[in-house]
Image (cartoon, rainbow, N blue to C red):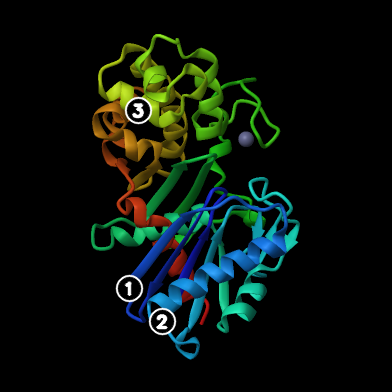
Amino acid sequence: MRVGIDVGASKLAFGVADASGVLRMRHRRAWIPSGDAQRDCDAIAAGAHELLARAGVPRGELRGIGVCAPGPLDAAAGVVLGPPNLPGWGRVPLCALLAQALGAPAALENDANAQALAEWRARAGQGVERLVYLTMSTGVGAGIVLGGRLERGADGLGGELGHVSVQWNGERCACGMRGCLEAYAGGAAWQRHLRRVTPASSRAAALAGSAGAVRPEHVVAAAREGDAFARAELERWNGYVARALAAIAVSLAPDVIALGTIAGAAGEELCLAPLRRRLREQVWPRIAERVRIEASALGDELPVRAALIVAERAG
Ligand SMILES: [Zn+2]
């Protein structure tokens, strides 16, 4: 049996799978990092223990632990290196801590990289050799799979597509640079923008309770109801995402670009079809016809599936 753990900035997800990869049980819960890495690691180990107990897995039967966490991290060493979304985490040997707590070897991977691998595997048999995955959650994570292998670039520096420039000298990004995709399409950045510009009379403000409480999901819901402001905002968001998709399509021509979270929630009419139309306007027709823009194939299960793939590496 293997356990997969996804450590997010606002949630923890756990899954247990048997040796043939069949998901036996999963659990997801809201979580606020405490600011103390040791206490957070204890809480993560306790959550895994609890799920293993519920799934009836005795300690001796656990073969591997897979952990996904936000970067930066050293996957080979199993060490998390002070991610901005996990306050108080300096250099944390997460694999060693969890291996000790749970009594099995552990492997670590950047969350977006592992999710890209899981999305690629979910399309096994569909002739997909090259896949790029983009997740627009708090930030914009990305992973590149080429020929069934993660492409990390020199020193693991590659694949950070959330920081492709989509606006010359544009908004300041959390990374310190300007004009990154994440500064426009990331959930946190988009939410800040929405709270500045949402009219109090808009449907999005009504759904949120007030304009100052608007979140991306309110805009998606209002756009689905036909609200003009929400539709325009989503079009603006699509416009920035499409610039990054064009850069990815021209440079890699992947078989699939899979999009998670906001794009998955907004769906075909509000997001995927407009993105394909914009891509056709920005790249050669042969490329636009070849590169498939799709929503995540795994949806809610993706973080746990990704962590369980990492667990295969653990022994
Ligand atoms: Zn950036």
Q: Spatial distance from mark 1 to mark 2, Cα to Cα?
A: 9 Å
Residue 201 shown left or right of residue 60 in the figure: left
Amino acid type shown at disc 1: Arg
Image height of 11 relative to 196, above or below: below
Q: Foreground residue, 269 or 54?
A: 54
Q: Spatial distance from mark 3 to mark 1, Cα to Cα?
A: 33 Å
Q: Residues within 10 Å of mark 1 (few under 14, many from 20)?
A: few
Quadrant assignment, res 96: bottom right
Residue bearing the label numbered 1: 24
The tally of labels here is: 3
Q: Residues within 10 Å of mark 3 (few under 14, many from 20)?
A: many
Residue bearing the label numbered 3: 220
Quick one: label 3 or label 2, which is nearer the N terminus? 2
Residue 224 shown left or right of residue 47 in the figure: left
Q: Foreground residue, 127 or 4?
A: 4
Residue 225 shown left or right of residue 46 in the figure: left
Residue bearing the label numbered 2: 1
